Amino acid sequence: MTPPPALAIVLALLAASLMGTIGVFARFAALPAEHITFYRLLLGALFLMAYMLLTGKGQQIRHKPSKRTLINGAMLAGFMAFYIEAIEYTQMGKGDYDYLSRPCASVTLCALCVSRKA
């Protein structure tokens, strides 16, 4: 079931807002980056599991993840840990600018090097 477009936009904005809190939370929390990353990913997994159970997709939770899924999870955890650690050493504005500009730089570099259009 696809949500209405207005609801999808609201949910995307809510998700982006919640993801944007990571820098502020990391700056003022008196915890190491590993702890913040662990608890943030744990809460995300619990919320996702609750959502899947409430929407009747509980049978999809129990399966063996592929290697690609495990690698993506490890990279996400590493990204969050390194980002949180970096926030301690630089101004939040510079860190966020670097974080947000990298996808654009990657797409541009890929288009130039591989001769593919994004």
Image (tube, grey):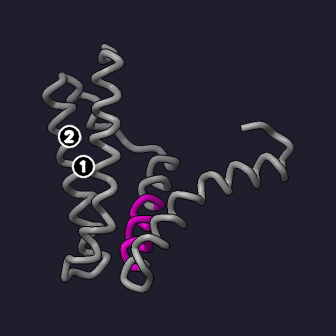
Nearest the eye: 97 or 56: 97
Mark 2 crowd level (few <14, some 14–19, many ≥20, 10 Å Cα): some
Nearest the eye: 40 or 25: 25
Query: Marks 2 and 1, how far apart in space?
Result: 6 Å
Q: Position of residue 82 (x, y in %)?
A: 44, 74
What is the secondary structure assignment of the residue under circle 1? helix
Q: Is residue 82 left or right of residue 7?
A: right
Report the residue marked by disc 1: 45
Q: Is residue 74 left or right of residue 59?
A: right
Mark 1 crowd level (few <14, some 14–19, many ≥20, 10 Å Cα): few
Q: Residue at x 28, y 68 (%)?
A: 24
Quadrant where the image shows the N terminus = top left
The answer to whether 27 is drawn above or below residue 102 in the figure is: below
Question: In the image, which residues are magenta?
Answer: 75-85
Q: What numbered label is drawn on residue 49? A: 2
Q: Is residue 84 magenta?
A: yes
Q: Given contact means CB atoms under 8 Å apart, are the residues at marks 2 and 1 in contact?
A: yes
What is the secondary structure assignment of the residue under circle 2? helix
